[in-house]
């Protein structure tokens, strides 16, 4: 039908102009852009829809790895975004600290939105000021003083697992370990545990809410207006990812209110909330909640992921579980002593250390690309010239599964962390980027390592994993944090004899 009036002509012209601009934009991005020389999906070249879809469904690292095998180590994953599947590029992008964070991406990890936290802080000065005040709380010495706190929660975990093992019931290790680490980190952040370990079947609200929230973070990166609209709608209209976000906000705010109602009194261990009060950081209540919520995800979810996926592979790898148990039994012949073991003694056990480091490598607890922006002129990398203003990124998957660094990278091989005499060797540690590298690496690394040593040692000293729910390798998905597809890592356990 052709237009018959001036109003119709105006509407037709507007549609034609918009269509022409869109077509010209697509043609430019596909064939004329400085990034058009780099391979990648056509849809990714013209729109961020491809990246958003893959992230939402947890498929991005898998699709990038497939693309790299076909076309090489640089993939165009957005109109102005290049991903580098190269360990040297990872170092150049993150360790040298020459490229600033891409603001839109990191602001999506604010809980509540608009309230900065340590991770979302883009400007380096603001980040350093915040980090400096939290360093005493997260130092190795401070974390070692918390071992009694960790062991208390470990005791609750064992008391929940033991009846299930005696009854030959299946245990979803992914959910169970996350409940353990979530209770530890909420004790540390809020001054009280959220009681995740007490929930039936380990389906804790804090864990499921965080899962739902993470699925939507990447929608908010490129389409921030979507959350603004949906937040104004009735709850029953809102998608699960937004409900998860609101649940995380409520958990943080209610915990802060209870902390403040108690006069902000000191516990017999350091608490994130009280640290801000003591140092008079001047943060708003929402910023306090945002920092605490960051710790819940970064400190609770990632450690639980590593423990569960590590336990799966230790069980699946011939001889690994038996060798680990023998080492632990020799060090702790009375099994009750493992519940009060000192982490500094556990760190001296070479095969336990090897299993922990290999679990961190193969689980890749944070597998997302962390975008930076090329500034200060073009970036010259291995003969490529990356234009100023380009968004660039890499990820831990690209490093941890690099066959030149880790031969047979898709195999779980704790022995790669041992020398010829069977002693633990840290020569590969420079390429273990589970906690990031450089000035903005994870502040909670010391806490995570203490958790991994205490909890993995106790689990394999007290229990034998009899069978696992699957024979094939776990298929992982990425919603910023890695998780097994279906959130299932179930196993049947046996209690070890005295």
Image (cartoon, rainbow, N blue to C red):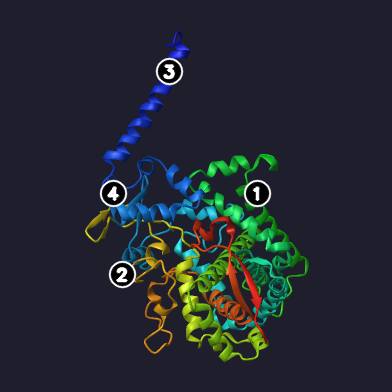
- In the picture of the structure, the residue carrying the numbered disc 4 is 38
Instruction: Name the residue nearer the viewer: 102 or 485.
Output: 485
- Residues at marks 3 and 1, CA–CA distance in whole angstroms: 40 Å
- Residues at marks 4 and 2, CA–CA distance in whole angstroms: 24 Å
Question: Is residue 389 at all visible to an observer of this figure?
Answer: no
Instruction: Please identify the quadrant where the N terminus is shown.
Output: top left
| Image-based side of 389 in relation to 189, left or right | left
Front position among marks 3 and 4: 4
Q: Residue furthest top?
A: 4
Front position among marks 1 and 2: 2
- In the picture of the structure, the residue carrying the numbered disc 1 is 243
Give the numbered dot on residue 404. Answer: 2
Residue at horizontal 61%, vertical 80%?
A: 458
| Image-based side of 353 in relation to 285, left or right | left
Instruction: Please identify the quadrant where the C terminus is shown.
Output: bottom right
Give the numbered dot on residue 12. Answer: 3
Nearer-N-terminus badge (1/2): 1
Q: Position of residue 54 (x, y in %)?
A: 46, 48
- Asked if the residue at tag 1 contacts the one at tag 3, i.e. Cβ–Cβ closer than 8 Å, the answer is no
Q: Is residue 391 above or below residue 192?
A: above
């Amino acid at each position: 039908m052709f237009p018959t009036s001036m109003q119709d002509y105006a509407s037709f012209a507007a549609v034609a102009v918009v269509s022409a601009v869109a077509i010209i934009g697509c043609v430019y991005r596909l064939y004329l852009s400085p990034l058009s020389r780099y391979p990648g999906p056509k849809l990714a070249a013209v729109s961020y829809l491809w990246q958003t879809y893959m992230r939402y469904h947890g498929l991005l690292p898998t699709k990038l790895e497939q693309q790299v095998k076909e076309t090489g180590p640089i993939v165009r994953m957005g109109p102005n975004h290049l991903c580098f599947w190269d360990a040297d590029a990872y170092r150049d992008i993150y360790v040298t600290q020459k490229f600033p964070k891409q603001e839109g991406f990191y602001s999506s990890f604010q809980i509540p939105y608009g309230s900065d936290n340590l991770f979302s802080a883009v400007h380096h000065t603001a980040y350093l000021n915040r980090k400096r005040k939290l360093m005493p709380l997260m130092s190795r010495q401070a974390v070692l003083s918390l071992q009694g706190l960790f062991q208390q929660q470990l005791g609750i975990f064992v008391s929940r697992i033991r009846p299930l093992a005696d009854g030959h019931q299946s245990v979803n290790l992914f959910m169970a370990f996350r409940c353990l680490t979530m209770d530890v980190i909420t004790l540390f952040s809020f001054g009280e545990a959220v009681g995740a370990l007490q929930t039936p079947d380990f389906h804790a609200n804090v864990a499921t809410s965080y899962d739902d929230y993470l699925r939507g973070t990447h929608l908010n990166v490129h389409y921030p207006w979507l959350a603004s609209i949906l937040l104004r709608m009735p709850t029953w209209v809102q998608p699960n990812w937004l409900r998860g976000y609101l649940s995380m906000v409520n958990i943080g705010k209610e915990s802060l209110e209870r902390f403040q109602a108690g006069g902000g009194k000191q516990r017999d261990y350091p608490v994130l909330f009280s640290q801000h009060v003591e140092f008079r950081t001047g943060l708003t209540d929402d910023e306090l909640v945002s920092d605490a919520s960051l710790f819940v995800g970064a400190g609770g979810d990632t450690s639980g992921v590593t423990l569960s996926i590590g336990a799966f592979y230790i069980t699946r790898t011939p001889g690994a579980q038996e060798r680990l148990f023998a080492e632990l039994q020799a060090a702790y012949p009375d099994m009750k002593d493992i519940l009060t073991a000192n982490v500094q003694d556990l760190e001296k056990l070479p095969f336990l250390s090897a299993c922990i480091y290999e679990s961190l490598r193969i689980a890749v607890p944070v597998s997302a690309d962390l975008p930076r922006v090329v500034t200060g002129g073009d970036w010259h990398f291995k003969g490529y010239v990356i234009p100023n203003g380009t968004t660039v990124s890499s990820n831990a998957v690209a490093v941890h599964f690099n066959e030149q660094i880790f031969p047979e990278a898709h195999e779980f091989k704790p022995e790669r962390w041992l020398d010829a005499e069977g002693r633990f060797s840290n020569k590969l540690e420079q390429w273990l980027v589970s906690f990031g590298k450089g000035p903005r690496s994870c502040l909670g690394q010391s806490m995570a390592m203490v958790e991994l040593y205490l909890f993995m040692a106790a689990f394999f000293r007290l229990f034998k994993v009899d069978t696992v729910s699957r024979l094939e390798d776990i298929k992982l998905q990425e919603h910023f944090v890695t998780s097994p597809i279906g959130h299932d890592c179930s196993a049947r356990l046996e209690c070890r004899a005295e």
